[in-house]
Amino acid sequence: MNHDDVFALWVYLARTPLLWLTVTILAYCLCDRISAALNRTPLANPVLMSMCLVGLLVRVSGTPYPTYFDGAQFIHFLLGPATVALGIPLYQNRQLVMRAILPMLCALLAGSATALVSAVTIARLLGAAPSIVVSIAPKSVTAAVAMGISGRLGGDPGLTAVLVILTGIMGAIIVTPLLNGLRITDKRARGFAAGLAAHGIGTARAFQVDPLAGTFAGIAMGLNALLTAILVPLLL
Amino acid sequence: MVLSLGLILLCQLVGEAIAHGTGLAVPGPVIGLVLCVLLLLVRDRFSRRMPVELTDGTFEQTGRGILSHLSLLFIPAGVGVIQRFDVLAGNALAIVAALVVSTVLSLAVTAWVFSIVAGRAE
């Protein structure tokens, strides 16, 4: 194959959804292996590593993000069904959950308000433009929902998605050392905090550590999406 | 497997329809989560009249399949960071400070309130 043929093949492949869908899935498989090989140490976060790897490939190949997303959207779409599927562990653990209903509601109100008010206040104090403040506000909520909130209130949904992911990665990395430092050992409390502050990425982290923590993380993620959607328009 | 997937999608579809139809602030997939729990309640109430796939654990397995790779699903949106370097760099201090402080505070407050209230109740 001469140079022109290779180029023609690249042009063809680069335009089909198949290429970036495959790259995303294989990059994740690789990074998940690395994370497992490092005993799931928080810093070797699979989302962070995959994002860097895929982002680098997209950048180096000169591919525009919308072209990448044409392929990757099939994965992105599954965020909705995954949220629905959180109902399954919730139902299976319903007795444990009902027993913890009071701590859950108190932690939800306190945590959701803290996440929202602290992010908005700090961003404003440091002089961020109003559209950026709106984009930061729903950062602890799962991507699809946060983008909706931000878009409705004049924020930038694309920026919100990025901030949501960065928050999730950060939360997933610091939750274990932070709560160890605070000597909070209750798995339900640890999982609930991870899901509330770091949505699905925190939930994925919680499931890595313990299924019960994962279940409470999933509930927190759902409840916080609900409460933040109500609180953000009131606060801003 | 296919029926399970179809029912999960149906929960989300009905959830989205309710969210958009009523103008509720509640996101469609979250309503779908509630519907999924209701579906399981109904299933266990009338388990004899249900299709085999719903009662033999396939439904649970399908859900677990999607959830076991939750991390994967965030990569496409995360790669969007390459498009936003300019905005992020232009507001780096405000964004980094807001994200870091708020994430640490909300993790600590949530876990702390949960364990205090749980400790009192038990």
Image (cartoon, coloured by chain):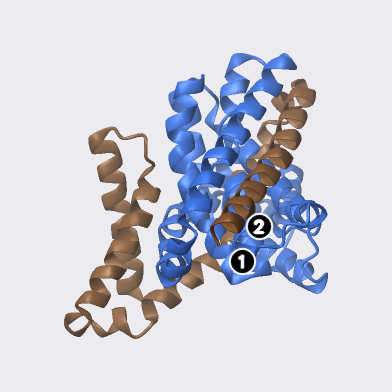
Give residue A165's quadrant in the image. top right
Tag 1: residue type? Phe
Task: Point out residue A70 in the picture as x, y percentages from the top left corner.
Answer: 51, 47
Q: Give the residue pinned by disc 2.
A: A190
Q: Residue at x 42, y 58 (%)?
A: A81
Give the brown chain's letter: B
Q: What residue lies at 16% left-to-right and 82% top-to-bottom?
A: B49
Of the chain colours in the picture, the one used for chain A is blue
Q: Residue at x 28, y 32 (%)?
A: B23
In the foreground, A50 or A217: A217
Residue A207: assigned label: 1
> Residue B26 at what x, y percent from top left?
37, 40
Circle 1 — which element?
helix
Residue A20 showing in the rendered view? no
Q: Which chain is indicated by disc 1? A: A
Measure the C-alpha gap from mark 2 to mark 1.
Answer: 11 Å
Residue at 42%, 67% (x, y): give it.
A94
Q: Quick check: A199 above or below A42?
A: above
Q: Position of residue A142 (x, y in %)?
A: 53, 45
Residues tagged by mark 2 and mark 1 found on one chain of the structure: yes
Which quadrant of the structure image shows residue B47? bottom left
Quarter of the image with the C terminus of chain B is bottom right
The local crowd at label 2, few if under 14, some if 14 to 19, many if 20 or more residues have their Cα within 10 Å, is: many
The quarter of the displayed image where residue B37 is located: bottom left
Q: In this rendering, would A79 be left or right of A20? A: left
The residue type indicated by label 2 comes to Arg
